Image (spheres, rainbow, N blue to C red):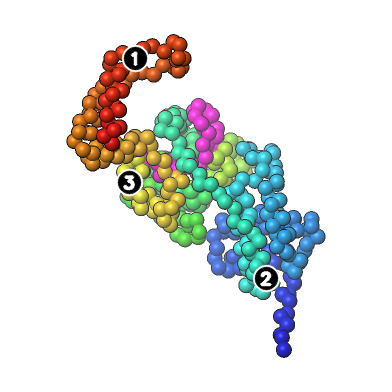
Amino acid sequence: MLQTVDPAPAMGLDELVRRFQDEQRAVELSPDTIRSYEVPLRQFLRYMAEHGVSRTDQLTRPLLSAWQESLKDREIDASTRNARKHLAPATRSLYSIAVRQMLTFAAREDLVELSLTLAVRRVKIHRGLPRPIPAADLAKISSYLDGKCKSGKLVWLRTRSLFWFLICSGARISEALQMERQEAARLVASDSGAARVTRKGGHEGLLLCPPAAVAMIREYIEARRDRSPWLWVSHLTGGWCYISGKPPGLLTIQAANEKWRRVAESAHVKVFTSHQCRHTTATEMLAAGIPHMVIAEHLGHADLRQLSTYAQVNIHARQTAVDAMDRLVKHHRPKSARKLMEQADKSEVVPMPNSAPTLDDSPAPNARTLRISESWADVAGAL
C-alpha cells in the first residue's frame, strides 16, 4: 500500500523572514551580512504581496523565476547620488542570495520543497578591474590635506588621519569606523601600530598601521576635547550639538564618502571612495614587491582569489614581464636568428605617416627601407 506524504505545513512569509533572521543571529552570522539581507527580503515580501502570495505553500518555481526577472527592470530612486537607472548585477546577486538562503532554511524546516531553491538562479557577475587612486592624484590629495591641517581644525585632522589609515592599513571603512578612542590610544602607545577589529564575516582581525600614519592619529586624538568613545566622529560646524555639550556621533560610511568627494573636487582629482583606498593599498604593495600572501593577509582576504580585483599591475611591471619573454625567445633561437634579431634591433624604425598614402602618392622605398624590411623578413623566416 502506497504511503501518502503529508504536505508541508504552511507559514506566513512575514513569519518565515522573521524566523530566518533569528536563525542568522543564532549561528552568529556577521551583523553586516544580516543587515545587507534586510532590503532584499523586504522587496521580496512586497513583490509577493502584490501578486497575492502571503504563505509558503503558495510559492512556486515560476513565481520565483518571475520575481528574479523583475529585478532586471527594477529602477533605483533617481535622487540617490551616483545611482544607476536599474539594479546592477552585483545588487541582483545579493537579492538572489538572500532569498535562496531563506528558501534553503525553509526547506530544512520542511516548510517548502528543496526544489524551490533551484528556481532562484545565480547571477553572473563580471570580475571588476582594480580602481586604485592614481599616483599623481594621491600626491595632490596628500598636499591638499596637509595644507588644510595647518589650520588645526578637527575636521581636517580627522579627514587626513582617516584617509592615510585606510590607505596604509587596507581596512574596510566599516572596520575602521569600529575603532574606539581607547583602542586608538593603545594603537598610538604601542610600537607595533596594531588594532583589533571585527573583520568581514564576523571573525577578529588585526589592522597594522605604520608610524607615519599613527602620528597623524595621535595629532587628531590630542586635539579632541569631546567625550565621544568613537575614534572617527562627525565634527559638526556648530549648532545645538556644541551648545548642549552632546558628544559628536559616529562618522557614517556615507558621510566619509561624501567627504572624499569634496576633497577630490577641491584637490582637482577624480572622485574616489573609501573602498578605492583598499585598491590603492593592494596596488602600492604589489608595486613594492610585497608577497601576494602578505598582501591578502593585510587586506583580510581568506585567499588569493580576490587579489586580482584589488591590485593593479603597473605598466612597468608588465614591461619587465615582456622583456623576460623576449630574453626567453632569444635564448631558445638558433644563433643565426639571434644575430639577425640584434641587427634588426639596432636598425632605425622607419616612422609611419599619420595617414596611409594612396597608390598614386606613395613614395618609392629607398635603399635603407628595403634593407630594414629584408632584415625583418629574414628574422621571421628564421623564427
Q: Vertically, is 326 above or below 246?
A: above
Which residue is outermost to the bottom? 1
Asked which quadrant contains residue 333, the reply is top left
Q: Name the foreground residue: 295 vs 265.
A: 295
Asked which quadrant contains residue 106, the reply is bottom right
Spatial separation of the CA atoms under disc 2 and disc 3:
50 Å
Q: Which mark is nearer the camera, 3 or 1?
A: 1
Q: Tell me the amino acid under the disc marked 2.
A: Glu
Q: Name the foreground residue: 339 vs 348.
A: 339
Q: Which residues are magenta?
A: 259-284
Q: Tell me the amino acid under the disc marked 1.
A: Pro
Q: Tell me the amino acid under the disc marked 3.
A: Ile
| Residue 65 in sight in this render | yes
Q: Which label sits on residue 365? A: 1
On screen, residue 248 versus residue 148, left or right, reads right
Circles 3, 1 touching at the beta carbon (< 8 Å): no
Q: Main secondary structure of the magenta part?
A: helix
Q: Which residue is mark 2?
A: 113
Question: Residue at coordinates 47% horizontally, 56% vertically from top-left?
Answer: 199
Question: Residue at coordinates 50% horizontally, 42% vertically from top-left?
Answer: 274
